[in-house]
Amino acid sequence: MTAASGTGATELFGKVALLGVGLIGSSLALACRRHGLAGRLAGYARSAESREVIERLRLTDSVHAEPAEAVADADLVVLCVPVGANAAVAEAMLPGLKPGAIVTDVGSVKQAVIRDVGPLLPEGVHFVPGHPIAGTEHSGPAAGFADLFEERYCVLTPPPGADEAAVGRVAELWRRCGSRVETMEPAHHDKVLAMTSHLPHLISYTIVGTAYDLAESERGEVIKFAAGGFRDFTRIAGSDPVMWRDIFLNNREAVLEILQRFGEDLSRLQRAIRWGEAEVLEDRFRRTREIRRGVIQLGQAGTFDAREPHKDDEAG
Ligand SMILES: NC(=O)C1=CN([C@@H]2O[C@H](COP(=O)(O)OP(=O)(O)OC[C@H]3O[C@@H](n4cnc5c(N)ncnc54)[C@H](O)[C@@H]3O)[C@@H](O)[C@H]2O)C=CC1
Ligand SMILES: O=C(O)C(=O)Cc1ccc(O)cc1
């Protein structure tokens, strides 16, 4: 057993309730168990099928079909459902919520959860929105693993006036799961993630769709000769449709803004190809290679994604 924070494996919360036990909820359950962070874990899952998997894998100590039952007596409640489901699930938990409880979430968009869930919570309940920047293209309760959050960032976006002790306890939870915790303004978070996560997913969904829509003979060749880049796109394009539908619908403005910029940059390259502007193309590709090399230095300094090996980046 490792205690990532070096503070020992002392329990942080008496009872933790996970509302939604998919990839992130199940990974958090496993990380809480591994690091001894919760006295008791309760899970809420909407479908009988998920509840059966959660029980079989013993992800939580109790499994519930109603959010209000799962949160009864919980010190920490973590919303782990798609962003668009947060309000309904939060509303359904209210009758069971303990006064003084901390409510957090793991959603990929932060302004929306503050808008949708914040106003529902009673006085005395502490709300600390969060986002572990860690995941995979897989989903569901069987997809989780305990070290998903190791050496990943977790961004907290506490609203103004948030209870500092509550923010500190949520930060400590993520630190003990192995994450590096930062706090950010919610609007800033949503802009940054629109660029670094949401746009790449949109491009992946588009490119794989375009490839599939090619004439059948060409489509076969696309699969046969799929090079690394296209394979990477198909991995990302395999991500959960409901989760990503909700991300785009709830981060509309930031995504549209970045998409506008991206479209202009793409058009510029399109024009360079059409008119044989070799210098424009080469300059752009040189610049991005330098950016990539800069990113690697950041990674080595521990500020980017320190887990990813970057074998392809020797100089020259
Ligand atoms: N998948 C990823 O890589 C990451 C996801 N997130 C965020 O974490 C949250 C959960 O995502 P995952 O665990 O990946 O998804 P998931 O699909 O694996 O799990 C979501 C769970 O919520 C349940 N659910 C869906 N709609 C519901 C509704 N209306 N009412 C009640 N339950 C409902 C599903 O049945 C499922 O068990 C999302 O908000 C997502 O934006 C954050 C970081 C990474
Ligand atoms: O699988 C990948 O490449 C991801 O990008 C995972 C991911 C998806 C959504 C998030 O909000 C954070 C991380």
Image: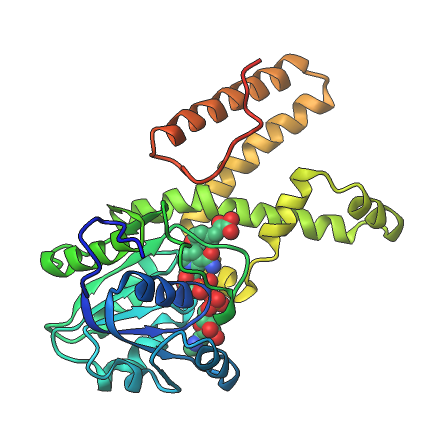
Residue located at (24% from left, 69% from top): 38
Q: Is residue 250 left or right of residue 244?
A: left
Q: In this view of the protein, can residue 24 be seen by the observer? A: yes
Relative vertical location of residue 257 with respect to residue 83 in this rendering, above or below: above
Residue located at (65% from left, 50% from top): 234
Q: Quadrant of ligand 1?
A: bottom left
Q: In this view of the protein, can residue 163 be seen by the observer? A: no
Question: Which residue is more in the foreground, 284 or 263?
Answer: 284
| Whole-percent x, y for residue 171 in the image | 22, 54
Q: Is residue 234 left or right of residue 109?
A: right
Relative vertical location of residue 76 with respect to residue 234 in this rendering, above or below: below
Residue located at (33% from left, 82% from top): 67
Q: Is residue 267 left or right of residue 19?
A: right
Question: Which residue is more in the foreground, 76 or 110?
Answer: 76
Q: Quadrant of the C terminus?
A: top right
Q: Quadrant of the N terminus?
A: bottom left
| Whole-percent x, y for residue 74 in the image | 21, 77
Question: Which residue is more in the foreground, 123 or 251?
Answer: 123
Residue located at (80% from left, 41% from top): 225
